[in-house]
Image: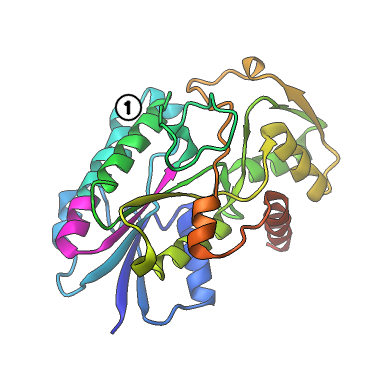
């Protein structure tokens, strides 16, 4: 019997990566329904009541979110609606369906004052509206006995708007760019995160639910290091200049340190995670083909 999986936010970087992987490598026993705001608005009660009752859900993968970090500081209501209220609606629906709920979250739930990789048990202390609303969503999911939170950081893909594509564009337009060198974390290729999510989906019977996992690519770098590698791999002669964060002020505070330990997810999936430079190289290679 086929297991039905609903994926929200299918028009985003992660949702599109999931679609691409599943289209290229279908997973037996699973039927995937990809939705975006136009086909399944997670903030609307009507979306849940209108969903066909004959479609018994096995799992929901929530990739939908309000991710405009700076804009969220002035748009608190919308950020809370998408990142917390809608997640509560999804969780109640998952409970009624008896479905697993995989919810993607962020490194912004931490304050960035740490000096060693954050584990899933590390204390959260978000400093931005984005981080606060994402943490609120996490708490709802983790109160459900089939809930699973997957935190990630510095997400990018060959599609959508992201740091990698911005640097490649600026690199072709300018002779130099300035990038902060005092914010440290781990980039995440959306394709690698999508594969990890699908691995978790197929191993639900072994997961200690409710639970939290951290996932990013292996390795640590600053945004400056990341930008420098983008130019090098992209073979662009644009100079990257390091600057401190105070020279690039943002409305929302950024975590100075947001490296997360992946030991837990490596243990459960029994798989190695690619280094960020390796995945970056593959992504830029893909962008050149397209």
Q: Can residue 234 be seen in this view?
A: no
Q: State yes or no: residue 288 in magenta.
A: no
Secondary structure beneath dot 1 equals helix
Residue 11 % position (x, y): 44, 55
Q: Label 1: how many residues lie within 10 Å, few (<14), some (14-19) or many (20+)? A: some
Question: For the C terminus, which image quadrant?
Answer: bottom right
Residue 15 % position (x, y): 45, 58
Q: State yes or no: residue 101 in magenta.
A: yes
Residue at 73% in and 55% down: 281
Residue at 36% in and 66% down: 204
Residue in front for this viewpoint, 71 or 247 = 247
Direction top: furthest residue? 246
Q: Name the residue under label 1.
A: 76
Question: For the N terminus, which image quadrant?
Answer: bottom left
Residue in front for this viewpoint, 42 or 276 = 276
Residue at 72% in and 44% down: 168
Residues rendered magenta in the picture: 91-105
Residue in front for this viewpoint, 286 or 217 = 217
Q: Quadrant of residue 208?
A: bottom left
Residue at 52% in and 69% down: 21
Residue 258 % position (x, y): 55, 34
Residue 234 % position (x, y): 78, 49
Q: Is residue 209 visible?
A: yes
């Amino acid at each position: 019997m086929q297991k039905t999986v609903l994926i929200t936010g299918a028009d985003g970087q992660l949702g599109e990566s999931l679609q691409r992987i599943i289209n290229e490598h279908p997973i037996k026993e699973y039927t995937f329904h990809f939705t975006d705001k136009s086909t399944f608005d997670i903030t609307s009660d009507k979306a849940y009541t209108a969903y066909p009752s004959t479609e018994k859900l096995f799992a929901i993968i929530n990739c939908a979110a309000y991710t405009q970090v700076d804009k969220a500081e002035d748009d608190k209501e919308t950020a809370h609606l998408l990142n917390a209220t809608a997640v509560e609606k999804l969780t109640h629906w998952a409970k009624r369906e008896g479905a697993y709920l995989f919810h993607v979250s962020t490194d912004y739930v931490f304050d960035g004052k740490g000096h060693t990789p954050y584990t899933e048990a590390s204390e959260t202390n978000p400093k931005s509206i984005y981080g606060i609303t994402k943490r609120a969503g996490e708490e709802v999911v983790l109160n459900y006995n089939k809930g699973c939170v997957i935190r990630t950081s510095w997400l990018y893909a060959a599609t959508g708007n992201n740091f990698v594509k911005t640097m490649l564009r600026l690199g072709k337009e300018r002779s130099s760019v300035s990038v902060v060198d005092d914010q440290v974390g781990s980039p995440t290729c959306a394709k690698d995160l999508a594969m990890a999510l699908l691995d978790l989906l197929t191993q639900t019977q072994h997961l200690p639910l409710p639970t939290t996992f951290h996932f990013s690519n292996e390795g640590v770098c600053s945004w400056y290091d990341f930008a420098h590698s983008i130019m090098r791999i992209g073979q662009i002669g644009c100079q990257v200049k390091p600057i401190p964060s105070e020279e690039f002020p943002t409305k929302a505070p950024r975590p100075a340190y947001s490296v997360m330990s992946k030991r837990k997810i490596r243990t459960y999936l029994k798989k190695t995670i690619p280094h960020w430079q390796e995945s970056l190289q593959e992504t830029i290679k893909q962008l050149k083909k397209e």
